[in-house]
Structures are given as structure tokens and as C-alpha cells.
Image (tube, helix red, strand yellow):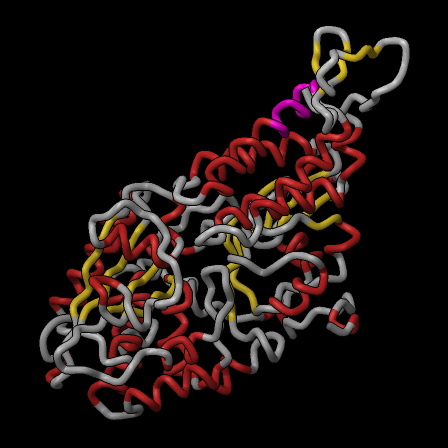
């Protein structure tokens, strides 16, 4: 990819005067009457379903033309994903799953929609159902979001009462139901095929693909899975037009986005701005670094995305192509800023602990690899590691990445791999030097070496 992407110039346009549309500053917007009166609530649904603004194919093409990419992490074209659904078969039900299993550290933007603007998401769900001729949506919400489950269920009930969900929506022949489903509290359920198994009452193991969900999804039927924020963008595209949405941010990654900013900043929170924001501008938005300190590292898209040094992050903008060139990814736009005092060894160990804990255990490279990764990092963090352990960790990343049914092993490996490569001095400072020769070492007679009470294997580790 050309180096011209990393220009250090914002691609977000006049972001300082940007008008919030996903989370507009409207009091009590979660109430359906306020949503209808002050935010053009359910206008897009009326225009499409009742007034014929788009037929299903036309709506799919409009979303495709907007350039909307999934906001759940993968960044795939939403309209293209919708078009993967097979032709309608009257003997086969079709399903939509709205993925609200927001469980990755550093990611906390979907819950803002649940709390402040749930009807925007619900309207997007019904429009997506219309576009793909779907009659049932399962709205899957993270198990720990108990309050939000209740909150969203109230909003769904209000929409049913108004005739926006259910049989013969707005007096038409289009019908659709929305079922709110609370997960059991597992990160793996955010993976789309695990989510489907969980919905079916099974252990949340990822499925091998193909077949893909559009061919064989929930209950073996055609299924599309979209993120909460992705679906919330759909009514905005209908009301304001694909051209409006495509005009926000860089050409290949368009629209407004919710940035979740955390870490060592003065004003952590969720901020709505265009895609293509400079990471340095987002630091300014969050009030700068705490205590006036320097920033050492940035995790740009949730804990699974490779960390960047501040030198790498400063010229980068928040869009998929530029961050890929910078050496990371957009993910869920959950940025974590780490200041100059951050111990990158302890930080990486904490992330590794999360992925070890959340591995479903189906695949050996992930089940065993995440455990060994955490043990090695713990040993280094506690001052008992050796410099050769760093190369062992990198080799372990190679054995995990790309060798499992889902991407959890990759998500566990990336922070470790790039944490070591980009902040190696931090890791080496916590390690003892590895050596095989000298007065303090003697052979144990089995190919290993003895250093005091420790036995080093041929790889140089106890």
C-alpha cells in the first residue's frame, strides 16, 4: 500500500463543528415520543415501508452506495453483506442478528446507543429486515449489560405498541418481530457464529466456515449478523441520503463513528465524530494526557488491535486503510492512550490474562497458547524471565495466529507480538540475560543447563 496514506493530515473535514447524529444532544431521546418529535423518529421506516421510497433491492443498494462499513470490528461493507442473502424461499425463514455482545476491553460505545438512542437502532433493524425480507431479528445483548437489556426491552415494547414492530407494520403487508436475548456473559459470543450457537442454546463454540451464515446460520437458516452501531446508521442514510453519508470522512471508510476513548486522558468517554480523525486530534478531544505527561502508546481499536508507539500514531487517521498501513487496525474505534509511565509488560500481561480467560477452548492453539502466553508474560513481569523468553513468545504467536476456527487466537497474539516488537526495551529491562557458558553454569547431563536452582531447557527457559 502506498505510503501516501500516512500524511499526518485529518481526513475528517471540519470536525470541530460536526453535528452529532447517532447520539444527538436531545434530552430523553430514549423515549419513543421524543424520538418521533425531535429526531425524525421512524420517518425513514414510514418512507420506505409505507411510502415506497425504496424496494428491498433499492434499500440495499442505497446502503451499499453510502460506503457504510461494519462498526463491530471487521469493517466489511454492510450493503454488500446484505446482498449475500440468497433468494427468498417461502419455505425457509430468514433471520437477522443484531450483535450487542460488546465485551472487548476498551470497547464501550454500543451501550451508549442502548441507553440514549435505542429507537435509532430498532428502526435500523426493521429497515434491514425489510431490505433482506427477514421477519425475525434476535437482538443479542451482552450478559453483563443487565440494565441495558431491560432498557432496550422497554424501547422494543414501545415500538410494538406504536405499530413499528409486529404484524402488518404501519398497515402494510410487511411483518417483523424483534426478540431481545441476553447472553450469558462470554466474550466469544461476539464472534458471529458463536453468537448463533448461543442463541440456539448450545455451547458458544465458533463454527467452521463455509458454510457462511448467509447460507446456513441460526437454526440452519439464512442469517445476517450486524453490529448495533452499524444498524443505527441505516435510518440516517435513508433520511439524509447515501451521498451525505459518503461525504463524511475518507472515501473508503465513510460516515460518523462513535470513538470510545479511555486510558490516561483527562476526559475519557464516547465521542461522535467523522471517520478519518487524526489520533492526535482525538487526544485533544479527550482533554489531553493526564498530568501533562507524554503519550507512550496508543491501542486504536480495542484491546485486540496492535499497539502503536506515539511516533507511529501521530500521523495516523482513524480509518481502516490508514491504520492498516500504520501497523494496526480500526477495530471498534476504542482508543486507549497510555502515558510515558506505562509498564508495557504489565499492560500486555493483563490483556493476555483476558484472552486466556475468555478462550472457549475449542481449538488447541488457542486453548493452550493463551495459557502459555500468560504464564510467560507473568514470569517476565515478576522478574523471573529470560531474554530468550521474548523470542519464545513471538514463536508462540506464530503457532497461534491463523490456526484456529475463529480469530480469538489472533486477537490474543497481536497485542503480544507487537507489544514486544515495538516496546522491546521495556520487556528486555525486565528479563535476565540468557547464557549457556560461564563459571556459574554447569551441565545437567541431559542437554539442559543448570543455573543455580533453575534448570534451563535447550530453548533457554526454566
Dominant SS of magenta comes to helix
Identify whether 69 is placed above or below 446: below
Q: Nearer the viewer, residue 120 or 199?
A: 199
| Residue 219 placement, left or right of 301 | left
Residue 62's image quarter? Answer: bottom left
Q: Nearer the viewer, residue 410 or 184?
A: 410
Residue 3's image quarter? Answer: bottom right
**Residue 416 falls inside the magenta stretch:** no
- Residue lying at 28% horizontally and 72% vertically, measured from the top left: 123
| Residue 429 placement, left or right of 123 | right
Q: Position of residue 221 (x, y in %)?
A: 23, 69
- Residue lying at 25% horizontally and 73% vertically, measured from the top left: 126
Identify whether 354 is placed above or below 77: above
- Residue lying at 59% horizontally and 45% vertically, measured from the top left: 399
Residue range (magenta): 376-384
Q: Position of residue 217 (x, y in %)?
A: 28, 65
- Residue lying at 48% horizontally and 67% vertically, measured from the top left: 20
**Residue 382 falls inside the magenta stretch:** yes
| Residue 361 placement, left or right of 370 | left
Question: Could one spot residue 294 in this view of the protein?
Answer: yes
Question: Could one spot residue 115 in this view of the protein?
Answer: no
Residue lying farthest to the top in this orientation: 453
Quadrant showing the C terminus: top right
Q: Nearer the viewer, residue 198 or 297?
A: 198
Quadrant showing the N terminus: bottom right
Q: Position of residue 321 (x, y in %)?
A: 64, 69
Q: Nearer the viewer, residue 405 or 58?
A: 405
Identify whether 134 is placed above or below 338: below
Q: Position of residue 449 (x, y in %)?
A: 76, 16
Amino acid at each position: 500500500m502506498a505510503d501516501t496514506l500516512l500524511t499526518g493530515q485529518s481526513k475528517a473535514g471540519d470536525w470541530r463543528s460536526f453535528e452529532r447524529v447517532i447520539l444527538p444532544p436531545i434530552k430523553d431521546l430514549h423515549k419513543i415520543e421524543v424520538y418521533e418529535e425531535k429526531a425524525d423518529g421512524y420517518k425513514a421506516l414510514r418512507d420506505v415501508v409505507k411510502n415506497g421510497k425504496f424496494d428491498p433491492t433499492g434499500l440495499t443498494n442505497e446502503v451499499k452506495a453510502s460506503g457504510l462499513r461494519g462498526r463491530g470490528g471487521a469493517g466489511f461493507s454492510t450493503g454488500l453483506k446484505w446482498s449475500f442473502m440468497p433468494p427468498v424461499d417461502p419455505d425457509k425463514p430468514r433471520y437477522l442478528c443484531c450483535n450487542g455482545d460488546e465485551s472487548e476491553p476498551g470497547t464501550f460505545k454500543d451501550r451508549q446507543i442502548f441507553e440514549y438512542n435505542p429507537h435509532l437502532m430498532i428502526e435500523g433493524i426493521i429497515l434491514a429486515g425489510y431490505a433482506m425480507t427477514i421477519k425475525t431479528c434476535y437482538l443479542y445483548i451482552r450478559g453483563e449489560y443487565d440494565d441495558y437489556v431491560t432498557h432496550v426491552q422497554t424501547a422494543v415494547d414501545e415500538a410494538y405498541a406504536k405499530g413499528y414492530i409486529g404484524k402488518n407494520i404501519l398497515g402494510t403487508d410487511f411483518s417483523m418481530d424483534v426478540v431481545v436475548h441476553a447472553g450469558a456473559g462470554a466474550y466469544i459470543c461476539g464472534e458471529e457464529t458463536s453468537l448463533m450457537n448461543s442463541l440456539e442454546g448450545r455451547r458458544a463454540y465458533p463454527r467452521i466456515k463455509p458454510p457462511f451464515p448467509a447460507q446456513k446460520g441460526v437454526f440452519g437458516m439464512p442469517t445476517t449478523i450486524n453490529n448495533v452501531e452499524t444498524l443505527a446508521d441505516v435510518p440516517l442514510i435513508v433520511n439524509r441520503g447515501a451521498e451525505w453519508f459518503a461525504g463524511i470522512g475518507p472515501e473508503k471508510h465513510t460516515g460518523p463513528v462513535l470513538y470510545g476513548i479511555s486510558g490516561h486522558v483527562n476526559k475519557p468517554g464516547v465521542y461522535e465524530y467523522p471517520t478519518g480523525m487524526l489520533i492526535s486530534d482525538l487526544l485533544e478531544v479527550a482533554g489531553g494526557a493526564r498530568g501533562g505527561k507524554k503519550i507512550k502508546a496508543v491501542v486504536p481499536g480495542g484491546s485486540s488491535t496492535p499497539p502503536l508507539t506515539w511516533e507511529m500514531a501521530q500521523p495516523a487517521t482513524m480509518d481502516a486503510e490508514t491504520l492498516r498501513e500504520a501497523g494496526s487496525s480500526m477495530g471498534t474505534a476504542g482508543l486507549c492512550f497510555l502515558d510515558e509511565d506505562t509498564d508495557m509488560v504489565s499492560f500486555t500481561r493483563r490483556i493476555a490474562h483476558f484472552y486466556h480467560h475468555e478462550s472457549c477452548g475449542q481449538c488447541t492453539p488457542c486453548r493452550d497458547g493463551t495459557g502459555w502466553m500468560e504464564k510467560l508474560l507473568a514470569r517476565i513481569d515478576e522478574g523471573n524471565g529470560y531474554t530468550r523468553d521474548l523470542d519464545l513468545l513471538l514463536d508462540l504467536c506464530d503457532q497461534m495466529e491463523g490456526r484456529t476456527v475463529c480469530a480469538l487466537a489472533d486477537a490474543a497474539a497481536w497485542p503480544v507480538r507487537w507489544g514486544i516488537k515495538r516496546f522491546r526495551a521495556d520487556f528486555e529491562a525486565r528479563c535476565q540475560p540468557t547464557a549457556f557458558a560461564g563459571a556459574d553454569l554447569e551441565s545437567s547431563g541431559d542437554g539442559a543447563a543448570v543455573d543455580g536452582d533453575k534448570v534451563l531447557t535447550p530453548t533457554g527457559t526454566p
